[in-house]
Amino acid sequence: MRSMLKTSVAALATAAVMATGAFAAGHAEPLTGDLRINLDTSNPAPRATMEAMIARFQAKHPDLNITTTVIDREAYKTQIRNFLSADAPDVLTWYAANRMRPYVEAGLLEDVSDMWAEGTDIAQELASTKGAMTIDGKQWGVPYTYYQWGIYYRKDIYEELGLKEPANFDEMVANCEAMIASGRKCYTIGTKWLWTASGWFDYLNMRTHGFDFHMQMARGEIAWTDDRVRQTFANWRRLVDLGAFVDDHQNKDWQQSLPFLVDGSAGAILKGNFAVAPLREAGLTDDQLDFHQFPSITEGVALAEDAPTDTFHIAAGAQNKKAARAFLAHMASAEEQSIINNGENLGQLPVNANASIDDDKFLKEGFAMLSSNSPGGVAQFFDRDFPAEMAKAAMEGMQEFMVFPDNLDDILERLESVRQDTY
């Protein structure tokens, strides 16, 4: 799906200028020429959000000719390598961490480390995601939105049982034992969609060994049969052997797992913030539902989080890199990130630590956690961080482990064989 937005951008830009009275007259060297932007934000709300943001940039730089191409998100994934190679735009949307690695290694994305240099606004205000934008010690893009993962729990049930948010994994297991003793399951989950199990692996692995180890695994540098990987699964098995998870989860998708939290037969769920809306729609109030960060497991291991992050990049073959850098700086500002992530637009979290967020309980908790309490780094989620073939096999193995934990040796041997083929 292709959309040439010059007319709408110009109209919106004119409106923005009239509203603010601020034009680009003060620029000693105004931006000129063409700026081509490729977007994968094809759904109505994200598309409108991006169009308006581009219009605000156009208002600052009226001598710039901006052309935007919108491509369906799934089609974009198959077209990105081709257009970066054959008809590169100046700016494009994509994802952080290992999802950008193939294009970095192919020399198709521009090194923007200068924008992340010490003392710059981006370095100071977007610090929580620098690791996710870094490959080989250099930065290759700038993020514009993300959302938190963590444990959403029934606060009223915790209070009924005298439980508190766990400070470490032992307390988490103790809470689980109390939950089971009350006739409930600790966690609801639906692993029919395999990625739900991999969220548990992400957190258990990062809490046991840290972000860097997890990323080494994602790059294929750690054997699945390594004793440290077995230690991660041993921690997971503490919960599996307790009967912590709802029964028959392998035949439920994630939406089908939510009623167990709603009716109180399970106490919590590990999920992204996208679960909040359906839980509210099902009748849970914010007095009943609460959120906490996944607790520490290994003392001294810095807390890292899953926070899938959407990003803008400059193509290595861009023709107007000066304007492209100016656009990324515009998009990264606290003002812009406050607007594009508000509830009327993306309804997610701004990456800029100085941005404001909507008056929403869970967005505020997630923003505080990711801005100030994720020193270990920000992962993108298992099936974004690991290559597709490895991710598919591993997620199948994780689901099997949760149902048949005694199969672990066979599972890890299979995954090690896939690792050797994949990398």
Image (tube, rainbow, N blue to C red):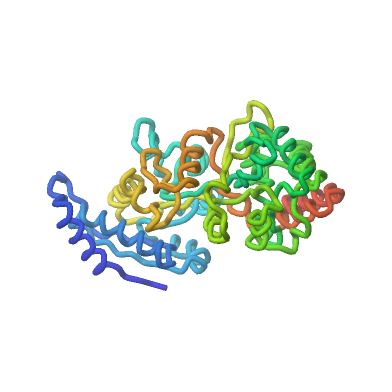
Task: Identify which residue is drawn at 67% across, 36% down.
Answer: 163
Place of residue 344 in the rendered image (x, y in percent of width and height, measured from the top left): 37, 58
197 sits to left or right of 54: right
The quarter of the displayed image where residue 383 is located: bottom right
The quarter of the displayed image where residue 258 is located: bottom right
Residue located farthest toward the bottom when viewing the structure as drawn: 1
Residue located farthest toward the top when viewing the structure as drawn: 300
Q: Nearer the viewer, residue 413 or 315?
A: 413
Place of residue 18 in the rendered image (x, y in percent of width and height, measured from the top left): 15, 57
Total labels: the figure holds 0
Please identify the quadrant where the N terminus is shown: bottom left
Task: Identify which residue is drawn at 40% across, 67% down.
Answer: 44
Task: Identify which residue is drawn at 62% across, 47% down.
Answer: 154
* In this view, 71 is above or below 343: below
Q: Nearer the viewer, residue 139 or 60?
A: 60
Q: Nearer the viewer, residue 288 or 170?
A: 288
* In this view, 357 is above or below 6: above
